[in-house]
Amino acid sequence: MQYEPRNPHHLRYVVDGPKPSEALLKTIEEYTLKLNQYLGYDFNTVEFAVRNGVPIAIDFCNPAPDAGVESVGAENFEWVVETAANYAIEKALAQEFGKDNLTWGSYVKSGATGTPLIAKATKTVAKPAAAATKEKPAAKPKATTKTAAKKSTK
């Protein structure tokens, strides 16, 4: 949906404005999918500002987006309702009972497992011998509550 903030509130979502290029729309679609996959969102709105042909994500944490007919207009509202309903049906039909059917994005997974958000470089750089001897050994991981409970029962 194109948005023009200078229009009156009820006309800000533009339906009949000039169409962006296919290349720009494809880039925005790619960025939107990557953001949502990373965040683990099944349903979300992502807003981009486009300056000099470059899309910049400005708002992308709306898993319960405001898509009221009074703000997005009738045509966009119909699309949102139809698409959301079809997606809800698709997800319900794909439900596997007894299984965790939640979508966990890379961002949440990295936080839960304590892994870095950005992968470390695969190429290692040789350290000078003097620096290697001064390094401290890696600290042992702390016991979790489960581990501590197991140790105390032995």
Image (cartoon, helix red, strand yellow):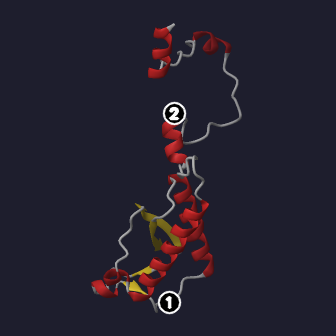
Q: Name the residue nearer the viewer: 30 or 53.
A: 30
Q: Name the residue nearer the viewer: 81 or 71.
A: 81
Q: Badges 1 and 2: C-beta atoms under 8 Å apart?
A: no
Tag 1, which secondary structure?
Answer: loop
Task: Identify the image quadrant of residue 134.
Answer: top right
Across and down, in percent, residue 17 comes to 46, 90
Instruction: Residue at 28% x, 83% y: name it.
Output: 9
Across and down, in percent, residue 129 comes to 67, 13
Outermost residue toward the left in this view: 8
Whole-angstrom CA distance, mark 1 to mark 2, is 46 Å
- In the rendered structure, the answer to whether residue 127 lies left or right of residue 65 reads right
Dot 1 or dot 2: first in sequence order is 1
Instruction: Residue at 66% x, 21% y: name it.
Output: 127
Q: Is residue 45 above or below residue 152?
A: below
Figure disc tally: 2
Tag 2, which secondary structure?
Answer: loop
Across and down, in percent, residue 88 comes to 51, 67
Q: Which residue is mark 1?
A: 18
- In the rendered structure, the answer to whether residue 127 lies left or right of residue 107 reads right
Q: Is residue 104 above or below residue 74?
A: above
Instruction: Residue at 48% x, 21% y: name it.
Output: 146
The amino acid sitting under disc 2 is Gly
The amino acid sitting under disc 1 is Pro
Q: Which residue is mark 2?
A: 114
Instruction: Using the rendered image of the protein, determine whether residue 31 is visible from the camera's viewpoint.
Output: no
- In the rendered structure, the answer to whether residue 123 lies left or right of residue 110 reads right
Instruction: Using the rendered image of the protein, determine whether residue 134 is visible from the camera's viewpoint.
Output: yes
For disc 2, the neighbor class at 10 Å (few under 14, some 14 to 19, many from 20) is few
For disc 1, the neighbor class at 10 Å (few under 14, some 14 to 19, many from 20) is few
